[in-house]
Structures are given as C-alpha cells and as structure tokens.
Image: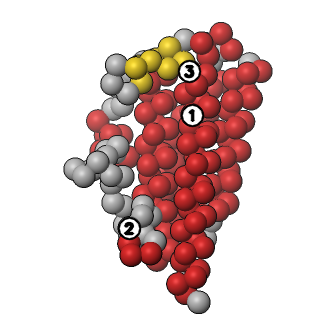
Amino acid sequence: MDPVVGMLFSMFDGNYRRLKSIVAGMSQEELDYKGPNLQYNSTAQLIRHLAYVDLNWFYRIKGEQIPEFLEEKYGPMLDENNGIPLIQGISVETLIAEYDEVFDKFKSLSYQLTDSHLNQTVDYENEDKATIRWGIWHIADHNRYHQAHINQLRKWYEGELS
C-alpha cells in the first residue's frame, strides 16, 4: 500500500481488530441486550450497522451501487422509524464472519488505491461529496465511536447480572 493509504487502512484495521476482541465470546443474550429499559441499540445491531456502513463506503469508492443481494444481507441503513434496524438471534460468530467479508473487500480495495486517489471525491449522503481520504478515516472513527457504545452496553449488562 502507498504510505498514506496504508496509514489510513491501519487505523481501520486496528479499530476492527479491537472491536472483534471486545465482542469475542459474547453470549447471545448479551449480544441482543438493548440496555436499561431496552432503549438503546444492541451490540448485534451496532456490528451489522458498522458492516453495512463500511460496505457502502467500499462501493462508494469504487463508484458502484451495492448489489441487491448484499443490500438485502446487510441493509437497510435505517428502519421505518429512522433507527438502526433490529437484529436479534444472530450469533456473534456469524455477525463477525459477515463483517470479515466486508473488511476483506475493503482491504483488497486499499491495496489498489494510491495516495493520489485519496483526494478524489465521491458522492456522500444526498448531494454532498467527500474525499476518499475522509471516507477511510470516517469508517475507522465510526467503528471506534460505536465501540464506546458496546463497552457501555457491556457495563450495563454486567451490572444487571449483579
């Protein structure tokens, strides 16, 4: 990888590895736990959401639409209430294996990118544009952001067991 692409990818890779270590061995009950009063997104929802957002960036950078079968597998972005879609009863191993597929696609794409590609703009939400550089940084940061939510859910879950 080119140096800057490699640096950005390593942020994504490091955050993804940390996510996997945080959820490794999580029980189904904890994975589906939605916090006190069931008012938050579960870890399962957050993992699927992260995979879907990263998949969107993969295809956005390639300048292609997400194939319908992948849209059905990972999507939609939001449910009818503008929330992250409910995911229940899917094991952490399955969710991570599916996210691994997205990660591997992105890794392969990163090897094809050069540092000069990073300033190219791509369509982003509605009529906005974003650089590829920002997009890769964003998915790494987005992953880390939701790890904080998962860590909080874990604390609440452990507290409820006590």
- Residue in front for this viewpoint, 17 or 145: 145
Residue 109 seen by the camera: no
**Relative to residue 129, is residue 72 depicted above or below?**
below
Q: Distance between the residues labelled 2 and 1?
A: 26 Å
Amino acid type, label 2 = Gln
Query: Residue 126: which quarter of the image?
Result: top left
Could you tell me which residue is drawn at 60 percent across and 12 percent down?
A: 119
Could you tell me which residue is drawn at 44 percent across and 18 percent down?
A: 129
Which badge, 2 or 1, is on the more N-terminal residue? 2
Asked whether the beta carbons under mark 2 and mark 1 sit within 8 Å of each other, the answer is no
Residue 141 seen by the camera: yes
Could you tell me which residue is drawn at 48 percent across and 30 percent down?
A: 57
- Residue in front for this viewpoint, 67 or 35: 35
Crowding near pointer 2: few (<14 within 10 Å), some, many (20+)? Answer: few
The residue tagged 1 is 138
Which of the image's four quarters has the C terminus?
bottom right
Amino acid type, label 3 = Ile
Q: What element carries label 3?
A: helix
Which badge, 3 or 2, is on the more N-terminal residue? 2
Q: Is residue 8 left or right of residue 83?
A: right
The residue tagged 2 is 39
The residue tagged 3 is 132
